[in-house]
Amino acid sequence: MLTLTPELLASIDFPAMLDGLPIGVAVVDREGRVVTVNTALERLTGFSRNEVRGVPSRHVVRSGLCQRKTPSDTAQDTDIVNRHRRKIPVRVSALPVKAREGKTLFRLELVEDLSALREMERRLEEPGGVGKLVGKGPAMERILRLLPSMAQADASVFIIGETGTGKDAVAEAIHKLSPRSREPFIRVNCGPMPPQVIEAELFGRVGPSGEIIPGAFQRAGAGTLYLSDIGEMPEAQQLQLVNYLDEGAIRPAGSTVGMRAQARLTASSPVGPEELARNGKLRQDLAFRMGAFRLDLPPLRERSEDIEFLLAHFLETFAAKFKKQVRGFTPKARRLLLNHDYPGNVRELRNIVEFAVMVCTKQTIPPACLPGHLLAQLGQGLR
Amino acid sequence: MRNKRVLIPLFKNEVAPRFDLASEAMITEVGEDGVVGRTEDFLLPHAGAEGLCDLILRKDVDVVVCGGIEEEYYHYLRWRRVEVLDNVAGLARDAMTRLALGQLKGGEILFTREDPHAG
């Protein structure tokens, strides 16, 4: 059996051990200054360990308890405001590390990201959906049923759908339901941009003094990297993705050395991988690798049973947001909305309801409160 | 042109680590020539971002120097034409001196790593 001898303990690579932990850790000296932070805390706060060394921990962790006189040793739920101005719900606790004779050597401040937990709690209270995904018709129900099992598997997912069908929301829901939900979700739009720019954006690049400036892969860590409109990606970067999927390694722009990466890939496009490959927009080998799991999101016109549910859902959402007592649509406005074919899908429907609730001063929304383009288009057929 | 009015939310003698938790603030006038003028201290009835935003607008503040600030308040202040230098960590007087010299940028950590601090 292993014995923890002083020599063995002294040989432990402490920083590497901290980096392996899934929760944020700051090592803080007796003066309250940061000695070092682990990778998880770097990601959570947005500060690198080099820039915060020697800085009072309250200026680094910035939790809701940071201005208290004495740090509490018991775990407490609060929030932090990170460098990117995001408020993140966290659980913080402190653990004094003492020498054998009882003298405190340093303190570990533990910061656990509770976003996923809070998100799940919020989702459980939400009827008819997962995250921003809502729908009640058979097509959406099938997708909502499929999502958890797709999320649990680790293979790449390809999401297909017209604009406004909720591809981004599906990608985010898969991440949040997956075992990687505590890790970052990074979205990169592969829309037209020069190959050098997208290469640095995805794989990082070597900075002027030889340091690696992180790209999406490094920022995603062991989380999810979501590539929207993958068919727009230059071929050279598609090849780099194939290599990553085969070998689990990437090479930052300007570097000759590869580095390990762990992100799960999710991609989306208005058309399927086969069609993209046929049109020369996606390498065949990448199409095969990315298309293992695919989700086809039906356009709203093909799931008209959802329109009524979505109208009610967004009406409630925006009435609450704008603090208005709007309760429904007049029969004529409702008829107009149910007969529209929504080329912009759920996004268009949502925008219409948002506009209508915003301009409406009554309890029910009349046609006059609907956007002009809709009235002009629909007024011809429905009088 | 009138002097710039600069507000720093405070935690003891430091720039408060969080904008929304500060219940004290100082407003200092800084001349175009970099001369630091009169400083007024304010004690808010309770900590909160809304109260600070009210104070900033009521007192015609031009620049806010703060630690962590939520996106919502950052954009609100920017929209109200208040310059916000956030993610600044250090003693309030050091931040003010650097600002007056035109040398303060958002994201600066001004603590010299060995100096005593408010903790």
Image: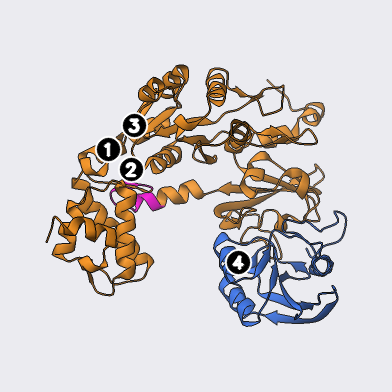
Q: CA distance from mark 3 to mark 2?
A: 12 Å
- Which amino acid, by three-letter code, is at mark 1? Pro
Identify the residue position indicated by label 2 in the image.
Answer: A165
Mark 2 packing: few (<14 Cα in 10 Å), some, or many (20+)? many
- Are the numbered discs 1 and 4 placed on the same chain, yes or no? no
Tell us which disc is closer to us: 3 or 2. Answer: 2
Quadrant position of residue A299: top left
Against A240, is A10 above or below?
A: below
Residue A295 in the figure: left or right of residue A84: left
The boundaries of the magenta stretch are A122-131
Mark-to-mark CA distance, 4 and 3 = 41 Å
Residue A69 seen: yes
Does the magenta segment cover residue A132?
Answer: no
Same chain, labels 4 and 2: no
Answer with mark 2 or mark 1, whichever residue precedes in sequence: 2
Label pair 4/3, CB-CB below 8 angstroms: no
Which amino acid type is marked by label 4? Answer: Arg
Lateral position of residue A372 relative to residue A231, left or right: left
Q: Colour of chain B?
A: blue
Q: Residue A192 has which mark?
A: none
- Work out whether residue A228 or residue A27 is closer to the camera in this orientation and state it: A228
Determine whether the residue tagged by mark 3 lies in a helix, strand or loop.
Answer: strand
For the residues marked 3 and 1, what is the alpha-carbon distance in whole angstroms? 9 Å
Which residue, given by chain and number where applicable, does mark 3 sit on?
A295
**Dot 1: chain letter:** A
Determine the residue positioned at 82% across, 58% down. Answer: B111
Q: CA distance from mark 2 to mark 1?
A: 7 Å
